[in-house]
Image: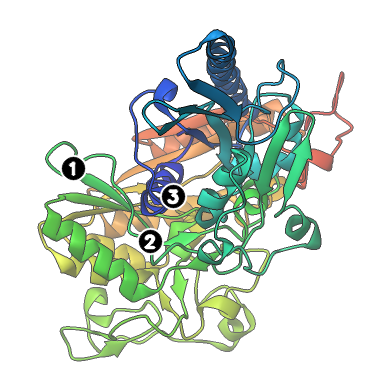
Amino acid sequence: TYGCQMNVSDSEIVASVLRDAGYEMVDAPDDADAILVNTCAIRDGAEKKIWHRLAQLRAIKLKHTRELKKQLKRDRQDVSGVFTGLTNGAGDDSNTNTKTVRESFNTKTNTKIKITTPVVGVLGCMGERLKEKLLQHDGLCDLVAGPDAYRDLPRLINAARGLGTGDTSSYSTDHESRSSDESESATGTKTSSGNAVINVQLSIDETYADISPVRKNAPSVSPSAFVSIMRGCDNMCAFCIVPFTRGRERSRPFASIIDEVKQLSEEGYKEITLLGQNVNSYADRSGSSGPSITTKGGVTTNGGFHPELQGSPDTERVTTTAQRADPFVKYYAPGFRSVYKPGRSRDDALRFGELLNEVSEVDPELRIRFTSPHPKDFPDDVLEIVRGKNNVGKMLHMPAQSGSSSVLDRMKRGYTREAYLSLVDSVRAKIPDVAISSDFITGFCGETDEEHSDTLSLMKHVQYEHAFMFHYSARTKTYASRWVFPNSKSRPPCL
């Protein structure tokens, strides 16, 4: 597994799907029938690591192929009664994929023996981004599955091994796709290397809420666990590939999250991290969101506003004429905007404030964290819950990306330097012992020395606990990848 915590969580989902299909985990690739690489595509450097790993796995496949050829030669010379054949058709002996499964039948013991060359699959964001291109590199992989196609993996693995398509009724992939191109990509294909299969269809509703993850470690080994609460991202930041590899935002039903947290608490886990590409934009309108939340003052709330946490049960949010004309003020921190109107998904929905409050009530001894948030989704009610709940972590990740308002505008982040600093001041005022971390990108399209200095001054001003910092890496399909700025002396700064 490569990349973010969501990939770790997704690997636990994959393990559950395959366990239910009769597979079991092994410790060494040499012992596997299928080797699945869960990938990251956020930067070019992440993909280079995966290409290198695929080359290593190809060496394992070639090793198995050589062993099969040697065994086949010995069997042909053997007179012991063992006859050998290939289950998925004959082909050129030099082809590593045409002899995925070899069968031997021992006439003396009446037993059938199968020797396999492992299927190598690419899962996740890199698979979604590159699609069929991954299959064009002969021998590197046999299977590609996007983040919303994990239910289909048992069928895909069987098809890649030449064992038939499997029972497709158990592995539905008929979720509505984002585009006709992606729908057409949810198919099998045939390449020069033999059987190759692909499903990169994105979904508008897949959350895997009904699948119980297979945790890598028991609570006695690692007391922390991940709980995925939403998937996808609608922010469309100019530099970011996530909306194209993870699809539209959708949230898990409220009740399913609470049930999973309760189960983890009963199993002995001491810390959970709520996960999402934009975790604090959670908004459940599924209709199965569980009970309404009643405050200590007897007020039932819906919409993320908790009067008792604001200091007075009679406090109400005042909506002025100007606020009603602003589609963002009801949902976001002051001064923050987005490319979409949040009311379309958040009106009458249970939002992150309610969820965080309810999760914290499951077990007062269970520590709660969440990642990765967007700073726009830190309205006052969420900050008040973080402050008021002792078991909610007081370290907030607030990705700034840049300290320059002009760069933030080109990034399409939806806020200015001043709005971000105002939010930081609000956070520190409401949560005095808070620690803040951040993300930063340097060298973004057309960034000048002065704009870079603005980022350095922001870091000095905020005094982050830690930060993840990277040089800009252009991603195809993103808005920024098509920009060219006149101040570039040697090459377009976005490429």
In the depicted structure, whether residue 325 falls above or below residue 371: below
Is residue 494 left or right of 383 when viewed as pictured? right
Is residue 26 left or right of 140 when viewed as pictured? left
Count of numbered circles on the image: 3
Label 1 neighbourhood size at 10 Å, few (<14), some (14-19), many (20+)? some
Distance between mark 3 and mark 2 Cα atoms: 22 Å
The numbered mark, 3 or 1, whose residue comes first in the sequence reads 1
Q: Which x, y percent locates residue 306?
A: 29, 79
Q: Which residue is mark 2?
A: 211
In the depicted structure, whether residue 256 falls above or below residue 419: below
Q: Which x, y percent locates residue 160?
A: 62, 40
Question: 158 or 474, which is in the foreground?
Answer: 158
Question: 458 or 373, which is in the foreground?
Answer: 373
Q: Residue at x 59, y 19 (%)?
A: 58
Q: Which residue is mark 3?
A: 372
Asked whether residue 391 appears in the rendered view, the answer is no
In the depicted structure, whether residue 58 falls above or below residue 300: above
Q: Which residue is mark 1?
A: 218
Q: Which x, y percent locates residue 495?
A: 79, 29
The numbered mark, 1 or 2, whose residue comes first in the sequence reads 2
